[in-house]
Amino acid sequence: MVAGAVVGATIADLHNQRREVVEGGRTVYTEPDRIIIRDPGGQAYVRGNDLYRFRYGARDIRTDTVGGETRTVVVRPDGSEVITVVGADGSLLRRIRRDPRGREIVIIDNSYRDPRAVGGFYVDVPPPVVNIPYDRYIVDAEEASPDVIYQTMRAPPVQRIDRRYSLDEIRYSPNVRMQMPSIDVNTINFETGSWTIPPDQAARLQVIADGINQAIQANPQEVFLIEGHTDAVGNEVDNLSLSDRRAQSAAELLTQQFNVPAENLTSQGYGEQYLKEQTQGPSLINRRVTVRRITPLLNGGQANAAPPPPRQ
């Protein structure tokens, strides 16, 4: 255990640490660093905690709770701060970066709810109409040039975005996410049941990191979603936890080895929901992570707007 997170383990090692309870018709599986929820209709999803990623290299960490909101300030060696505000239920409300001079940039404002939002975080919208070549909509990292990788990190939505979406709406609504091109990071492979990225494969994330860093340099408010996936082997709960850990492992590596700002990344696991190879057996292709720029979804399409003026 490191900072509450499980490291260097396989999914089988978590079985003794997982607790299951039924609350109001929902089944909740609690692990040391995330929860999996199955609602009464059978739909299941996983919710992790991005804060574990911010502890790497921190000079100081302060946490306080005021009025039901918990505010965690991670102080970095250069004096800059990353401020994360979560609600009483543990869901992310805001993430802010403050430079050593006190100037702030809001990276994520997850407290916003569009007046058209109904019910929970699933948004029922039609699949997007895609009028760009398939290999530029779902980019193969192994085949794409660094220039194509970078262009995808800055690419606009495939259709007009008509409103802002919360981070949770993006995470849990596939047709919302699919309005943005994505990159399948098939240059790294995971062993069955494992979320460890082998050391000899870590360097293959260099081109992905370079593309993300260039995009963030152009717009410090960029946000990228790292999506984790599994093959169909194993049960649903294991696969949701495993996929979420794969996404987090990739995000951690991008920060720790390639200096991608942790606050510009978020991660989410989807288990076996989106198989690339339609098989119920073991599949290296399906054990993967995907990177997707979600800034236009968070801000309603104003992705290239200038950052807010510095706080005086």
Image (cartoon, helix red, strand yellow):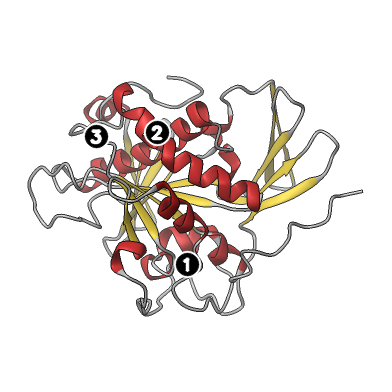
Residue for point 56% across, 36% down: 51
Q: Earlier in the sequence, mark 3 or mark 1?
A: 1
The reply to whether residue 36 is visible in this rendering is yes
**Residue bearing mark 1:** 120
Res 291 label = none
Residue sitting nearer the eye, 192 or 158: 158
**Residue bearing mark 3:** 190
Is 136 placed left or right of 102 in the picture?
Answer: left
x and y, in percent, of residue 271 in the image = 27, 49
Q: Amino acid at mark 1?
A: Gly
Is 105 placed left or right of 168 in the picture?
Answer: right
Residue for point 37% across, 49% down: 145
Rounded to the nearest whole Å, what is the CA distance between mark 2 and mark 1? 28 Å
Residue sitting nearer the eye, 301 or 145: 145
- Of tags 3 and 1, the one toward the viewer is 3
Is 255 placed left or right of 45 in the picture?
Answer: right
Image: 101 above or below 137 = above
Image: 268 above or below 192 = below
Rounded to the nearest whole Å, what is the CA distance between mark 3 and mark 2? 11 Å
Q: Are marks 2 and 1 in contact (CB under 8 Å)?
A: no
Residue for point 24% across, 36% down: 189
In what element is the residue under mark 1?
A: loop
**Residue bearing mark 2:** 249
Q: Amino acid at mark 3?
A: Phe
Around disc 3, counting alpha carbons within 10 Å, would you say few (fewer than 14), some (14 to 19), or many (20 or more)?
many
Rounded to the nearest whole Å, what is the CA distance between mark 3 and mark 1? 33 Å
Around disc 1, counting alpha carbons within 10 Å, would you say few (fewer than 14), some (14 to 19), or many (20 or more)?
few
Around disc 2, counting alpha carbons within 10 Å, would you say few (fewer than 14), some (14 to 19), or many (20 or more)?
many
- Of tags 2 and 1, the one toward the viewer is 2
Q: Please identify the quadrant where the N terminus is shown.
A: top left
In what element is the residue under mark 3?
A: loop
